[in-house]
Amino acid sequence: MKFILGRKLNMTQIYDEAGNAVPVTAVAVRGNVVTQVRTKENDGYEAVQVGEGARNPRRINKPLRGHLKELGSFASLKEFRVDAPTLKVGDKVGIDQFKAGDTVQVSAISKGKGFQGVVKRHGFRGGPRTHGQKHSEREPGSIGGGLRNRVPVGTRMAGRMGSDRVTVKNLKVAHIDAEDNILYVSGAVPGRRGTLVEIVG
C-alpha cells in the first residue's frame, strides 16, 4: 500500500501526449517521516504513523516532544492502516513510490462555508413568490406539525456548512515533479490552499 501526506497548492492544467488539457491539483510533499509503527501485539491493530512538514519546536508540548524524540518537529501527524508494515521508525516516505497513471484516493478537510440556509446547504427549492407569500422564497417551510410537539431528530435545517472530512476516490496521478516534490492529481481535491491532504494508492 502506498501513502503520503502533502499540502494542497492550487489547481492548474497540464497537457497529455495527445495535447489535451487535463485539470489537475498540485500537492506539495514536504518531509514525510515514520514516527511510530503500531502492531497488533502492542496496540491491537497495525498502522504506520507519519509526520509531515515542520513547525517551531517551542509550539510542541512535552509529551509529543518526547514521543517524537530526535525525529523532528512536525506540523502534522497522521496514521495509515497498513497490514504487516515493513517500515521502521525514522524511515522516510517519498513521492518516488507513485508514478503517473496510478489510481489514488484523496482525503482532506473541505472548505468551511459558514452558516448557510437550507437552499444552499440541502438544495431546498424554497417557496413560491406568489399565492399569498411575500418573503418566503428561501425559507425551509414546515418543520413538524400534526400531532408532534417537537422537531424530529435529523430534520434538515440551516446551520454550519463545510469543514467536513471528504474522501474522493478513483483519482489519477497525472504527473510527478520529483525535483520540486510536487504531485499532480487529476481533478479537484477537497480543501483550501494549504490544507493537509492524505493520498493513498
Image (cartoon, grey):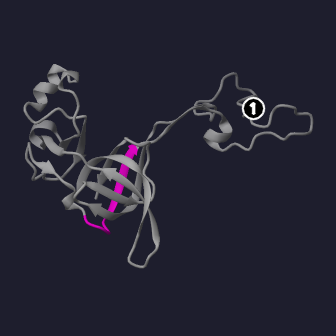
Image side of residue 142 versus residue 30, left or right: right
Q: Residue furthest front?
A: 179
Q: Secondary structure at mark 1?
A: loop
Q: Nearer the viewer, residue 131 or 147?
A: 131
Question: Which picture quadrant has residue 102?
Answer: bottom left
Whether residue 144 is visible here, answered yes or no, is yes
Question: Which picture quadrant has residue 196?
Answer: top left
Residue 165 is one of the magenta-drawn residues: no
Image side of residue 127 versus residue 32, left or right: right
Residue 121 percent across, percent down from the top left: 61, 39
Residue at label 1?
Answer: 142
Residue 190 percent across, percent down from the top left: 44, 47
Image: 176 above or below 62? below
Please tell me which residue is depicted at 13% across the width and 53% down the height of the picture.
84
Question: Magenta: predominant secondary structure element?
Answer: strand
Q: Which residues are the magenta region?
A: 99-108
The quadrant of the rendering that contains the C terminus is bottom left
Q: Nearer the viewer, residue 5 or 128?
A: 5
Image side of residue 98 versus residue 72, left or right: right
The quadrant of the rendering that contains the N terminus is bottom left
Q: Nearer the viewer, residue 45 or 93?
A: 93
Whether residue 1 is visible here, answered yes or no, is no
Please tell me which residue is depicted at 21% across the width and 27% down the height of the picture.
56
Please tell me which residue is depicted at 70% across the width and 22% down the height of the picture.
149
Residue 125 percent across, percent down from the top left: 74, 44
